[in-house]
Image (spheres, rainbow, N blue to C red):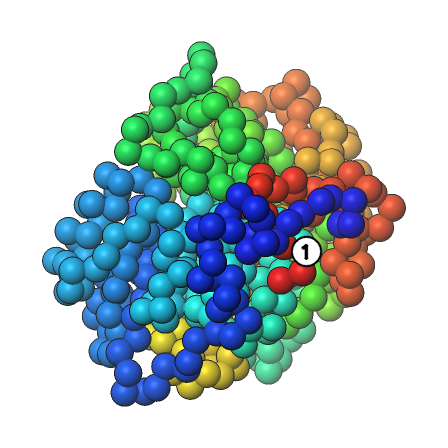
């Protein structure tokens, strides 16, 4: 990491004038919010998940949605109207996040911006004495995720990860039941993200960015390149500069449950990925069909992404969930394979256990309010009260990033090369064959349109680096664009 020059934002000449107050308060933090005090929250990023943040905080007693922040003024204006309708009282609106952090009347920030902004916004918030609710994935790369963990500890901040399934008592109880050994030892934890993802289109040249958007702020830590896709918003997920594909979009939820099931609290010793972007040529570059294998000692964690429908007919007729594959009753979920059966987690709030013959043994149902859990922890000042700590968020996000690093270090290979990889995967069964069959069902000949067979990554869990591969280690971080730089020392 030392070969990359970074500067702490608070010390950069370009930002000094705008952040004098922030810099003065960086190490002091703010006073703890007492149980009787109104908690003033700012929601940052107001499309999609940000709206959910606003609606939920507005319903919680003792919480005020005090500010809204977004770099798109059209989005900001519309969000304010919705917030007032949801019960907020005239929240202030701010375009530049740094101005928000200067304010003494904001206790916590709730971040729902694109992935490439998550880590820097969280670190800055900790330095400014704010508590943080941070959407998944918490980071855009492995290194910066660990920097958030350091910042939360250094400034004694409460930082919640937005993997809300962790608050569901049904999932908590189901995983505890499995780990008590009722259906034998765990042999494999399998995460599934079978979610329809159509082409984002292909443009012939740079697109005009809406005048209402501060594009420099939108790009932030990422390279400021011409917009080369039809939509600025949302489709950033499918471009590696800003997103992490469906591994780090929907898939991070299921990756987190699978790691939780295994009880693993570090990165795996080895990882490999196989995948590609198939069936259309567009402006995205992340895989839409992929499997990732994390070789944990207790049992492997295997993750599958499928953005294409089950076959060509489903492609032609519908791009909806009912046209997607499923595996043991789940499409977006987790299957925990055990010696004597399996646990099925097909949603955020339910689970069921089956014996080896498919007989249902147990069932669990029920969710909980993840935002309320964050608020309770802010009031108690006990990070251990969080159901989804920033440490958990970092580790599960890093599993997604490692899969993509392996993919980016890979080379094209046909069925024979994939079969060779599959032969080295413990307990993975017919995963590689099913992957290839899925491509063929969608009219793709893997001998001609060869998937990318990723590089095996040998990982040191203590240092969170990759052994013997300088290029892979480079992909564990990024070159930051000043002044939007995640600091080496938080």
Closer-to-camera residue (489/223): 489
Within-10-Å neighbours for mark 1: few <14, some 14–19, many 20+: some
Tell me: residue 468, above or below residue 278.
below
Q: Nearer the viewer, residue 168 or 14?
A: 14
Asked if residue 456 lies left or right of residue 322, the reply is: right
Q: Percent from the top left, x then y, of residue 135? A: 44, 57
Q: Position of residue 268 (x, y in %)?
A: 73, 60
Q: Nearer the viewer, residue 46 or 468?
A: 46
Residue 192, percent from left and from top: 52, 51
Location of residue 396 in the rendering, given as x and y in whole percent from the top left corner: 59, 60
Q: Is residue 404 visible?
A: yes
Q: Which residue is mark 1?
A: 488
Farthest right residue?
Answer: 468
Residue plotted at (65% across, 42% down): 478
- Work out whether residue 337 can be spotted: no
Tell me if 211 is positioned left or right of 312 in this view.
left
Measuring 31% from the left and 40% from the top, which residue is drawn there? 72
At a point 36% along the width and 81% down the height, the residue shown is 33
Residue at 76% in and 50% down: 1
Q: For the C terminus, give its image quadrant.
A: bottom right
Question: Viewer-proximal residue, 402 or 208?
Answer: 208
- Name which quarter of the figure residue 64 lies in: bottom left
């Amino acid at each position: 990491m030392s070969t990359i020059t970074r500067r702490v934002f608070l010390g950069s000449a370009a930002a000094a004038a705008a952040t004098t107050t922030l810099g003065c308060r960086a190490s002091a933090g703010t006073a703890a919010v007492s149980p009787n005090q109104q908690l003033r929250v700012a929601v940052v990023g107001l499309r999609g998940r940000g709206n959910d943040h606003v609606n939920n905080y507005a319903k919680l007693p003792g919480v005020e949605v005090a500010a809204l922040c977004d770099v798109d003024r059209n989005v900001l204006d519309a969000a304010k109207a919705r917030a007032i309708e949801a019960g907020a009282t005239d929240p202030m609106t701010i375009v530049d996040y740094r101005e928000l952090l200067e304010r003494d009347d904001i206790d916590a920030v709730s971040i729902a911006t694109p992935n490439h902004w998550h880590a820097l916004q969280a670190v800055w918030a900790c330095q400014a004495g704010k508590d943080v609710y941070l959407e998944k994935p918490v980071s855009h790369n492995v290194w910066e995720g660990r920097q958030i963990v350091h910042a939360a500890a250094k400034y004694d901040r409460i930082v919640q990860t937005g993997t809300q399934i962790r608050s569901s008592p049904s999932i908590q109880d189901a995983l505890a039941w499995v780990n008590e050994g009722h259906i034998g030892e765990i042999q494999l934890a399998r995460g599934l993200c079978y979610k329809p993802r159509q082409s984002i289109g292909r443009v012939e040249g740079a697109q005009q960015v809406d005048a209402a958007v501060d594009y420099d702020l939108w790009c932030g830590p990422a390279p400021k390149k011409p917009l080369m896709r039809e939509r600025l918003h949302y489709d950033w997920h499918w471009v590696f500069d800003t997103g992490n594909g469906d591994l780090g979009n929907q898939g991070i939820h299921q990756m987190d449950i699978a790691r939780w099931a295994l009880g693993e609290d570090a990165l795996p010793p080895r990882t490999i990925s196989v995948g590609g972007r198939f069936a259309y040529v567009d402006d995205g570059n992340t895989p839409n069909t992929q499997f990732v294998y994390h070789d944990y000692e207790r049992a492997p964690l295997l993750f599958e992404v499928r953005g294409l429908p089950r076959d060509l007919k489903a492609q032609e007729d519908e791009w909806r969930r009912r046209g997607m594959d499923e595996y043991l009753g789940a499409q977006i979920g987790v299957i925990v394979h055990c010696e004597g059966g399996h646990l099925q987690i097909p949603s955020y709030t339910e689970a069921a256990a089956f014996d080896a013959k498919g007989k249902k043994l147990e069932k669990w149902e029920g969710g909980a309010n993840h935002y309320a859990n964050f608020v309770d922890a802010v009031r108690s000042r006990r990070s251990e009260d969080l159901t989804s700590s920033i440490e958990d968020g970092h580790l599960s996000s890093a599993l997604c990033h490692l899969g993509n690093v392996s993919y980016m270090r890979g080379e094209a290979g046909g069925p024979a090369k994939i079969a060779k990889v599959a032969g080295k995967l413990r307990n993975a069964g017919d995963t590689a064959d099913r992957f290839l069959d899925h491509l063929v069902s969608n009219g793709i000949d893997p001998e001609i349109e060869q998937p990318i067979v990723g590089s095996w990554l040998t990982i040191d869990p203590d240092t969170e680096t990759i052994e013997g591969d300088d290029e892979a280690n480079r992909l564990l971080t990024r070159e930051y664009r000043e002044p939007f730089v995640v600091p080496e020392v938080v």
